[in-house]
Amino acid sequence: MAQAEFREVLTVDQKKLFEIITRYDQYPEFVEGCKAVNILRVGENEVRVEYQVNVMSQEVNYTLDHRHDVETGRVEWTLVDSNFFKKNNGKWELRSKGKGKTEVFYALDIEFKVPVPGFILNRLIKGSLPGMVKSFEKRASSV
């Protein structure tokens, strides 16, 4: 099991960032390693999404249920199915810090079906978080 958290104030509007986070179908355009996304079901404040990504030179497929609330700036997800993960749960929490600034809290709790050495896990999860969050900031700033 691996857990990681990331908190930072980004120079981007909260509503724009929330909009980019919840446009799951656009992830392959700007999220490194994301090859394909398939929206399976859309509800009022929930979406079931199937992802195809490359992790450690391996094709990984997984399905997440996302719940989101624009008013609270919260997006949460839980694992439905995967060929690689036993667990993949997490959340985004966005708080406006004034004009054009947003405090971002990102938390991830994952567990793999196969053993993964600790040093790879740390690099994979904790090392890639800042860059991944920055890719969302860059995308939100460009729209």
Image: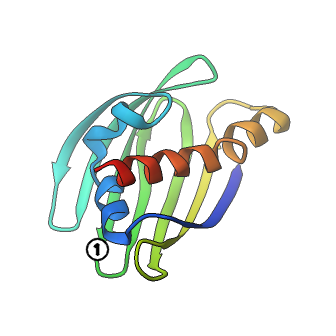
User: Under tag 1, what secondary structure?
Assistant: loop
Q: Is residue 127 above or below residue 77?
A: above
Farthest top residue?
57
Q: Where is residue 47 in the image (x, y as percent from the top left)?
A: 25, 55
Q: Position of residue 137 (x, y in %)?
A: 46, 54
Going 51% across and 56% down the picture, which residue do you hit? 89
Label 1: how many Cα within 10 Å (few below 14, some 14–19, many 20+): some
Identify which residue, 120 or 30, lies in the foreground.
30
Identify which residue, 119 or 95, lies in the foreground.
95
- In the rendered structure, the answer to whether residue 57 lies left or right of residue 32 reads right
Q: Where is residue 139 in the image (x, y as percent from the top left)?
A: 38, 47
> Residue flagged by tag 1: what amino acid is it?
Val
Snapshot quadrant of residue 22: bottom left
Q: Name the residue under label 1.
A: 70
Q: Count all numbered tags in the image, as a single digit.
A: 1
Going 65% across and 41% down the picture, which residue do you hit? 128
Going 34% across and 58% down the picture, which residue do you hit? 66
Instruction: Report the coloring of the rendering.
Output: rainbow
Going 54% across and 52% down the picture, which residue do you hit? 133
Q: Where is residue 92 in the image (x, y as percent from the top left)?
A: 47, 65
Q: Is residue 125 above or below residue 13?
A: above
Identify which residue, 75 or 41, lies in the foreground.
75
Identify which residue, 16 or 67, lies in the foreground.
16
Q: Is residue 24 above or below residue 18?
A: above
- In the rendered structure, the answer to whether residue 60 lies left or right of residue 7 reads left
- In the rendered structure, the answer to whether residue 5 lies left or right of residue 73 reads right
